[in-house]
Image (cartoon, rainbow, N blue to C red):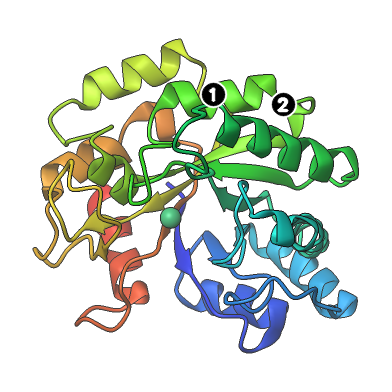
């Protein structure tokens, strides 16, 4: 089993990889740059290459997460900056040897034209990926449904990938909290959830999982992550276990984005995951 967590780049990209290794993790996620801004980062390529070499040596897998303001459905004045920022994230992640860069599915931009968001999302993805020659993928993450229902079903995730000019440069990242909050997965429908995803070939392109519990019930559409093993989340441990130990997800890295300051650390959660559900 491949378990890990989000880690800080406070000590650079190599420092992030070393921190993950110190947690005994086999995967991790990081922000390639300031998570609050789309400002382009002139990054230290030596540090990124050292990170890549370290990860290869220690069999560590990584993914990067785009800054919070990143949107595949940006407003007109943010369009160029968003495209440049996504390419910057891809460059950094590629230099660090990361599998992919996680970006949330777009949100509803028009009350009257239901297809407007899809057109813009395809435009953004096609523009970025037509300029992208590296190996690192864009990983589309399912939404919790906070700002409208866009990106909460397997159909939408798979369809955008299929309609894009460069589907081979796109994979998926499944967030278990978002899937639960949106109602895609309610803990009780795991078999149906896997069956549907398999029928649509979603899992063939699933490259990472954000393993989170949820502070709100299924269908609440609220995006608040809870710890896996603290009984403060609405997803039952038995249901999380069923998900994590599914043979369909055996090769996929599970990465915690759980609170690290609410009584249990990532390091502790990773070691509990390994003890209980690792093999
Ligand atoms: Zn997530």
Q: Nearer the viewer, residue 211 or 90?
A: 90
Query: Relative to 32, is 42 above or below?
Result: below
Q: Residue furthest bottom?
A: 11
Which residue is depicted at the point 33% across and 44% down?
Answer: 145
Residue 94, how many percent across, how many down? 80, 56
Residue that badge 2 annotates: 164
Q: Is residue 278 in view?
A: no
Left or right for 45, reference 165: right
Residue that badge 1 annotates: 158
Which residue is depicted at the point 71% across and 78% down?
Answer: 14
Which quarter shows the C terminus? top left
Q: Nearer the viewer, residue 244 or 39?
A: 39
The 10 Å Cα crowd at callout 1, few under 14, some 14 to 19, many 20 or more, is: many
Which residue is depicted at the point 15% across and 49% down?
Answer: 235
Residue 153, how many percent across, how many down? 39, 28
Q: Nearer the viewer, residue 75 or 102?
A: 75
Q: Is residue 268 in view?
A: yes
Left or right for 220, reference 42: left
> Which quarter of the frame holds ligand 1?
bottom left
Secondary structure category for the residue under label 2? loop
* Displayed quadrant of residue 248: top left
Query: Sequence order check: which comes first, mark 2 or mark 1?
Result: 1
């Amino acid at each position: 089993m491949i378990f890990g967590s989000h880690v800080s780049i406070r000590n650079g990209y190599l420092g992030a990889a070393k921190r993950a290794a110190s947690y005994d993790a086999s995967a991790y996620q990081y922000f390639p740059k300031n998570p609050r801004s789309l400002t382009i980062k002139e990054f230290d390529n030596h540090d990124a290459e050292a990170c890549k070499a370290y990860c290869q040596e220690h069999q560590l897998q990584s993914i990067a997460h785009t800054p919070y303001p990143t949107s595949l459905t940006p407003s007109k004045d943010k369009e160029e900056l968003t495209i440049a920022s996504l390419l910057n994230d891809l460059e950094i992640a590629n230099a660090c040897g990361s599998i992919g860069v996680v970006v949330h599915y777009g949100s509803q931009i028009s009350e009257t034209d239901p297809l407007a968001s899809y057109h813009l999302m395809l435009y953004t993805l096609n523009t970025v990926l037509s300029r992208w020659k590296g190996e690192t993928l864009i990983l589309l993450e399912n939404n919790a449904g906070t700002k409208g229902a866009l990106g909460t079903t397997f159909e939408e995730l798979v369809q955008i990938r299929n309609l894009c000019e460069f589907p081979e440069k796109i994979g998926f990242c499944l967030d278990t909290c978002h899937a639960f909050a949106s109602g895609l997965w309610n803990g009780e429908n795991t078999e149906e959830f896997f069956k549907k995803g398999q029928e649509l070939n979603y899992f063939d392109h699933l490259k990472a999982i954000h393993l989170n519990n949820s502070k709100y019930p299924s269908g609440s559409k609220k995006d608040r992550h809870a710890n896996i093993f603290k009984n403060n989340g609405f997803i039952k441990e038995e249901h999380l276990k069923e998900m994590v130990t599914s043979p369909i997800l055996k090769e996929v890295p599970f990465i915690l984005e759980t609170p690290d300051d609410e009584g249990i650390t990532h390091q502790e959660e990773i070691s509990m995951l390994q003890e209980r559900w690792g093999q």
